[in-house]
Amino acid sequence: MTVSTDVRAPLAVLGHDVQVPLASGEKVTYAALDYAASAPALQRVWDDVAAYAPYYGSVHRGAGYLSQLSTDLFEQSRRTVADFLDLRDGDQVVFTRATTDSLNLLAGALPAGTRVFAFETEHHASLLPWRREGVTVQYLRAPRSHGEAVAALDEALAAAADGPKLFCVTGASNVTGELWPVAELTGVAHRRGARVVLDAAQLAPHHRVSVRELDVDWVAFSGHKLYAPFGAGVLAGRSDWLDAAQPYLAGGGASRTVAREADGSVAVEWHAGPARHEAGSPNVIGAYAIAAACRALTEAGFEALERREQQLVARLRDGLAAIPEVKVLSLFGEDAARVGVLSFVVRGWNSSHFSAALSAEYGIGVRDGLFCAHPLVRTLLGGEDAAPSECGAPEPSLPGERSLNAIRVSFGAGTPEEHVDRFLAAVRELVTDGAKWTYRNEGGRCVADTAAGR
């Protein structure tokens, strides 16, 4: 098998030339098309981190040179992220582990009696953290247009009782890639006295995100989706609710003073600002990696990156539209604007089986399942069972469901055109000729049964 190793892409990423084995024993250059789960690290990010690594030291309060250098780098990373997000005066950047961590942090900072509103179409990270004592959650039905989403939110907020309110919304769906009308929804929320948190996990790697222009109150995103490894994320925005809340974690760094009381108890005065919710030794390399990615994306120019990505999106959509057996999943319609994320099913195929064949026979990595957005995928698939397969599906099904899953392909600034073309050629060949190998379930994964042969 001869596969092009063309790696031309706007930004260089690690792993662009990694060779992976096929079921046949041959090796091909890996086509990474699962950016929505974790994007490969930018070479620029890796190089920046490697250059800093010899100077790594403890952050905050260290008297030594390396500690001071690391502290300065950590705080400069915070300022870089603030600039990247176009924050308002008085907004703060809190470093977390990921989007999920950021939204759970915010959930713990909600004033008592807060009512939270979210569409059932959200990723579980922005759907589930609000389910806690003292908070009421109202899940809104999946809208089928931007206008319907805005109207549904307006109606729900108008009927809500007085008190603190929060609306959580994704910027771009992790299932369909479709863009949500964030500015319009935020306008409605603010008119109705609600605050807004934007889940930008899938938006920030593809589009410029301006907190000032969108007027959202908070934004959350993950480094590992922004081409920055090392397990860090961001929660950025207004400080008042965060400063009024108990620290997310109790410990060193979050406390300003700790004193023993006469009765034997301990009195604590907590810091205000980001330190309040960053107890413990911070992930300075993770924060620096995010800042390096922010700089790289900004310098590359989001407008140019978006234009090029939309060309690949159009290429992908046109290619799949030409295959009658393929059904692309969409909430807002075929013409809805989207980032480089798209999910689909193939008639006559179980999605786990199809994805496994793409990997084992073509060296193409995609995602299959329900994508941590079970209610949305069930809505998009209409509860219809997937085709039977010896592999089944990796996600647990509801009672009465045999198997329900889809395939997701996703890409970004490190994706060469050849990977999209290779993917489309593989889909056409699998649909036309079928898989060359038999497959079996191994530990919940669908894998080629090389012992059984073709």
Image (tube, grey):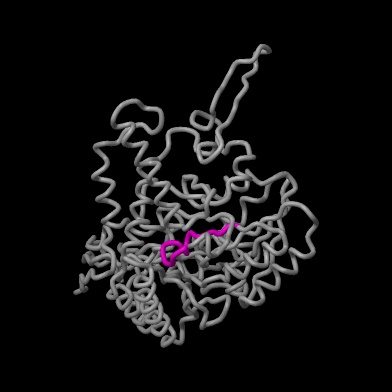
Q: Nearer the viewer, residue 174 or 359?
A: 174
Does 176 sit above or below residue 166? below
The N terminus lies in quadrant? bottom left
What range of the chain is rendered magenta? 197-209
- State how many labels appear: 0
Q: Is residue 186 left or right of residue 299?
A: right
Farthest front residue? Answer: 89
| Residue 229: x %, y % from top left | 36, 50
Q: Nearer the viewer, residue 210 or 164?
A: 210
206 within the magenta span: yes
As for residue 20 lying within the magenta part, the answer is: no
Residue 43 lies, with reference to residue 278, above or below; the image says below
Q: Which of the two residues, 309 or 5, is positioned nearer the viewer here?
A: 309
Say if 66 sits above or below 429 in the image: above
Q: Picture coordinates of residue 218 (x, y %)?
A: 56, 54
Location of the C terminus (image quadrant): bottom left
In this rendering, position of residue 252 left or right of residue 434: right
Q: Position of residue 21 (x, y in %)?
A: 25, 62
Prevailing secondary structure of the magenta residues: loop
- Residue 56 sits in quarter: top left
- Image spot of residue 264 (x, y percent): 65, 13
Point 49% across, 45% down: residue: 94
Where on the picture, by quarter, is residue 57?
A: top left
Quarter residue 195 falls in: bottom right
Q: Is residue 1 visible?
A: no
Q: Is residue 125 left or right of residue 66?
A: right
Can residue 203 be seen by looking at this rendering? Answer: yes
